[in-house]
Image (tube, coloured by chain):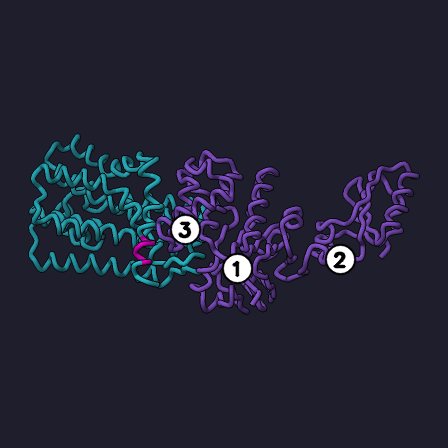
């Protein structure tokens, strides 16, 4: 069995004032030792998915397995394999990173010497060893987040589940977290990550899934996801571009337009045209964000299609 | 799950939730002691030393009762906010360890005030070794019942915001500690003194007064008071466990 996590027709319906279908039959399979990212807009169902897989929330239908153990019927077995970093987690102000890592390891059942060793290793992995005895209230946002990640790492769980772990962090802190995550994957850990940041998904993922309104829209490697759209290049044009109707895929952003074309030649041709019109333009391959926006239905077509 | 793992996790959670305050924020301990000390201070000012022993009994019980209800409500709501609860749910930790550890933590923080007020009672000759064991059991039951009430409120008001729950816990603490006959003898209520049996804090205060010789009650009444205390605690625990969900439905 090469699957660490597998969901089958996972459904979640919240019954409050109105019925909300958060997940509508999601099938996802995460291999052992890979970093799998669940990408989606806010409210897409990412956190719901993660909370079900991490046995915090019961599904309304379907099931999921972690190393062959059902999250519905065998949550205690699942919990032996996982560690979770929830979204927007807040640190205890007068707790230290060391205490986070050490006591969480103890709660996993590790003996005192083993927990000490695990905490030391986890803090080293997140580059917090030197700050291990500082109270969390004196740490920066990134350091606090890394302290929480250390508490998950010290458990030595096979599968780490992180819900938007870099949300709210600055670029430097974000990269620190990404580096830690990739190191964990190198050590053989399986990581299930949720994010709404395209750059994060692009840089850290081995494979990713796009989820929107509870539906799985796409799954695959980055190149496979990008291949899902016919348009491979984007040309960003500044100023009033008169020939928008000549193109099928155009997004208008105020005084700028993004024109999507299928080939490099088309992109070059469009660049020449814009230059002749005395407009500024820039061509590049499509980004994950372009594909994402198109797949989740957010593209604003102004073309003649 | 093995019982020794459950007990060990209980102690770890209690330690996690009390040790940082013990070490880095000892004012918390002073604050908990103040809850009992302030009414005691006013009692001394306005009535002299005549009600001192009653005031000390109130201070002793308020030290654990106030923290008990606070534990149930505030810790749970705070844990939801900081998401530590989510992290623990996803770990091989039994829910009983979490609940017991959460309730035990403030009790550990109130130990210094219990020792202080208990020590004062002993120094005035109001506490003897023979009665100490009964009083300790009664005080522990006060903590257990108040924690159970706190957990019950937190469980049934699951969707209420942390700030509302925080205010509610303080209000409940004050209501249970300062209104019923905890700092004063239930004999002052006259025909309504039976009310004190129904409220865990005043029931315990009455029992403590009985063992200190301040409230003469027949043995049958004392037994009934113990039974009611145990039953009310069990009822609150049952009501909580019926509604509480470790994993959200």
Q: Which quadrant is home to the N terminus of chain B?
A: bottom left
**Of marks 1 and 2, the one in the foreground:** 2
Q: Which mark is nearer the camera, 3 or 1?
A: 3
Q: Which residue position is annotated with label 1?
A: A17
> In the rendered image, is residue B178 in sight?
no
What residue sits 56% from the left and 55% below the top?
A192
Q: Quadrant of residue A108?
A: bottom left
What residue sits right under mark 3 in the picture? A105
Tag on residue A227? 2
Q: Residues within 10 Å of mark 1 (few under 14, many from 20)?
A: few
Q: Nearer the viewer, residue B193 or B25?
A: B25
Name the side, left or right, on which B166 lies relative to A300. left
Find chain A in the image and tell me its colour.
purple
Near-viewer residue (B151 or B216): B151
The residue nearer to you, when weighing A172 against B219, is A172
Q: Colour of chain B?
A: cyan
Q: Main secondary structure of the magenta part?
A: helix
Label 2 resides on the chain identified as A
Indicate which disc, 3 or 1, sits on the residue closer to the N terminus.
Answer: 1
Is residue A80 visible in the rendered image? The answer is yes
* 2 and 3 marks on the same chain: yes
Query: What residue range appears in magenta?
Result: B5-10
Numbered tag placed on residue A217 in the rendering: none
List the single residue furthest toward the top: B45
Asked whether, in this view, residue B64 is left or right of residue B94, the answer is left
Q: Tell me the chain of label 1.
A: A
Label located before the other in sequence (2 or 3): 3
Left or right: residue A278 compared with residue B83: right
Give the x, y percent position of residue B119.
14, 39
Compared with residue B108, is residue B247 higher up or lower down, i.e. above or below? below
Q: Give the SS element for disc 2.
A: loop
């Amino acid at each position: 069995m090469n699957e660490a996590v597998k969901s089958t027709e996972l459904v979640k319906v919240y019954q409050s004032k109105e019925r909300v279908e958060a997940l509508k039959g999601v099938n996802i399979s995460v291999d052992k030792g890979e970093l799998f990212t669940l990408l989606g807009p806010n409210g897409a169902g990412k956190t719901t998915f993660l909370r079900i897989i991490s046995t915090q929330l019961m599904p309304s239908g379907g099931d999921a397995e972690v190393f062959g153990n059902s999250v519905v019927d065998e949550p205690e077995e699942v919990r032996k394999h996982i560690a979770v970093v929830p979204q927007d987690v807040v640190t205890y102000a007068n707790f230290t990173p060391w205490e986070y890592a050490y006591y969480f390891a103890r709660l996993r059942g590790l003996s005192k010497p083993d927990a000490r060793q695990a905490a030391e290793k986890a803090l080293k992995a997140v580059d917090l060893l030197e700050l291990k005895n500082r109270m969390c209230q004196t740490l920066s946002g990134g350091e606090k987040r890394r302290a929480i990640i250390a508490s998950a790492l010290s458990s030595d769980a096979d599968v780490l589940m992180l819900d938007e772990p870099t949300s709210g962090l600055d670029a430097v802190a974000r990269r620190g977290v990404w580096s830690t995550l990739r190191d964990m994957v190198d050590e053989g850990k399986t990581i299930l990550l949720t994010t709404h940041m395209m750059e994060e998904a692009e840089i850290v993922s081995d494979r990713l899934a796009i989820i929107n309104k509870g539906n799985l829209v796409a799954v695959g490697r980055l190149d496979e996801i990008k291949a899902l759209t016919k348009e491979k290049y984007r040309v960003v044009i500044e100023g009033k571009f008169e020939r928008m109707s000549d193109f099928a895929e155009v997004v208008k952003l105020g005084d700028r337009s993004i024109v999507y074309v299928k080939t490099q030649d088309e992109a070059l041709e469009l660049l020449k045209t814009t230059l002749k019109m005395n407009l500024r333009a820039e061509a590049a391959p499509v980004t994950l964000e372009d594909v994402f926006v198109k797949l989740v239905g957010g593209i604003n077509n102004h073309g003649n299609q | 799950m093995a019982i020794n793992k459950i007990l060990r996790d209980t102690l770890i959670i209690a330690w996690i939730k009390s040790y940082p305050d013990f070490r880095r924020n000892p004012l918390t301990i002073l604050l908990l002691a103040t809850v009992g000390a302030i009414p005691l201070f006013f009692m001394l000012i306005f009535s002299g030393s005549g009600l001192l022993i009653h005031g000390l009994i109130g201070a002793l019980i308020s030290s654990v009762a106030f923290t008990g209800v606070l534990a149930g409500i505030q810790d749970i709501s705070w844990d939801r906010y900081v998401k530590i609860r989510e992290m623990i749910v996803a770990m091989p930790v039994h829910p009983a360890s979490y609940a017991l550890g959460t309730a035990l933590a403030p009790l550990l923080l109130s130990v210094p005030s219990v020792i202080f007020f208990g020590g004062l009672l002993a120094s005035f000759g109001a506490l003897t070794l023979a009665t100490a064991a009964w009083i300790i059991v009664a005080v522990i039951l006060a903590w257990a019942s108040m924690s159970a009430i706190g957990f019950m409120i937190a469980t049934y008001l699951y969707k209420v915001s942390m700030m509302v729950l925080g205010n509610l816990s303080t209000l409940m603490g004050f209501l249970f500690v300062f209104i019923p006959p905890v700092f004063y003898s239930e004999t002052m209520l006259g025909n309504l003194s039976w009310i004190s049996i129904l409220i865990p804090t005043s029931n315990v205060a009455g029992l403590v007064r009985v063992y200190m010789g301040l409230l003469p009650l027949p043995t049958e009444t004392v037994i009934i008071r113990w039974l009611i205390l145990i039953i009310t605690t069990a009822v609150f625990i049952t009501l909580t466990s019926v509604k509480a969900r470790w994993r959200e439905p």
